[in-house]
């Protein structure tokens, strides 16, 4: 069944070139420019392109190369990175910034999980060789982790209702 040629609905994530084509059309139309007007602006900026090429790119009939994408981004006054993002999100710069923050935080979490696993494995290997200190070491780890978790919860959520705000995380 052929897909209707209309703007993608909210939440639909297209692939890179489809994003660029859609975004170019959306940005051009938002400015009230024809394909001729966009072509003229590209040419004035030193990016040679005729109106037919603009139409073919917007309609997926011509692939866009990096130089073309740079030209469109410059003429449209948008960041190249945002040109390739999903049009519904890329048009909202703050959304893109927040998405980047979430992805960066996720990557940091993944790195931290790998570091934790490596450290825990090293400790477990050591304790397997020294079973006489396993119980004490496990208690120390559990206590330290519980303390850190309490501090994090306090930072994230504030003090528990009914508790004195001046209590430290150590007392919580």
Image: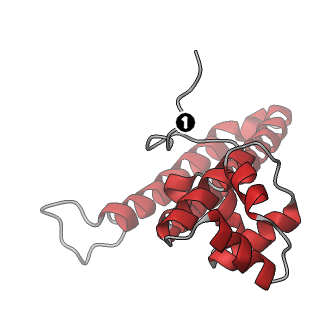
Residue 59, quarter of the rendered image: top right
Residue at point 39%, 67% (across, down): 155
Q: Quadrant of the N terminus?
A: top right
Q: Which residue is mark 1?
A: 5
Which residue occupies the foreground of this view, 50 or 74?
50
Residue 68, quarter of the rendered image: bottom right
Which residue occupies the foreground of this view, 160 or 49?
49
Residue at point 79%, 71% (across, down): 70
State the residue lying farthest toward the bottom: 44
Tell me if residue 120 comes above or below residue 44 in the rendering. above
Q: Quadrant of the C terminus?
A: bottom left
Residue 116 in view, yes or no: no
Residue 61 in view, yes or no: yes
Q: Residues within 10 Å of mark 1 (few under 14, many from 20)?
A: few
Residue 154 point in image, percent of width and height? 35, 64
Residue at point 83%, 41% (across, down): 126
Which residue occupies the foreground of this view, 79 or 111?
79
Count of numbered labels shown in the rendering: 1
Residue 118 point in image, percent of width and height? 79, 44
Residue 163, quarter of the rendered image: bottom left
The image's colour scheme reads secondary structure
| SS at circle 1 | loop
State the residue lying farthest toward the left: 162
In the image, taking residue 40 as reference, residue 144 lies left or right, namely left
């Amino acid at each position: 069944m052929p897909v209707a040629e209309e703007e993608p609905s909210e939440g639909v994530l297209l692939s890179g070139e489809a994003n660029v084509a859609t975004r170019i059309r959306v940005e051009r139309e938002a400015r009230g420019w024809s394909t001729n007007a966009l072509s003229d602006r590209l040419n004035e900026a030193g990016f040679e392109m005729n109106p037919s090429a603009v139409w073919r790119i917007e309609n997926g009939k011509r692939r866009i190369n990096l130089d073309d994408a740079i030209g469109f981004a410059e003429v449209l006054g948008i960041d190249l990175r945002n040109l390739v993002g999903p049009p519904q999100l890329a048009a909202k710069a703050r959304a893109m910034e927040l998405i980047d923050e979430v992805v960066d935080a996720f990557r940091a979490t993944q790195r931290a999980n790998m570091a934790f696993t490596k450290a825990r494995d090293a400790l477990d290997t050591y304790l397997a060789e020294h079973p006489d200190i396993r119980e004490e070491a496990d208690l120390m780890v559990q206590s330290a982790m519980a303390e850190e978790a309490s501090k994090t919860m306090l930072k994230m959520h504030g003090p528990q209702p009914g508790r004195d705000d001046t209590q430290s995380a150590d007392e919580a």
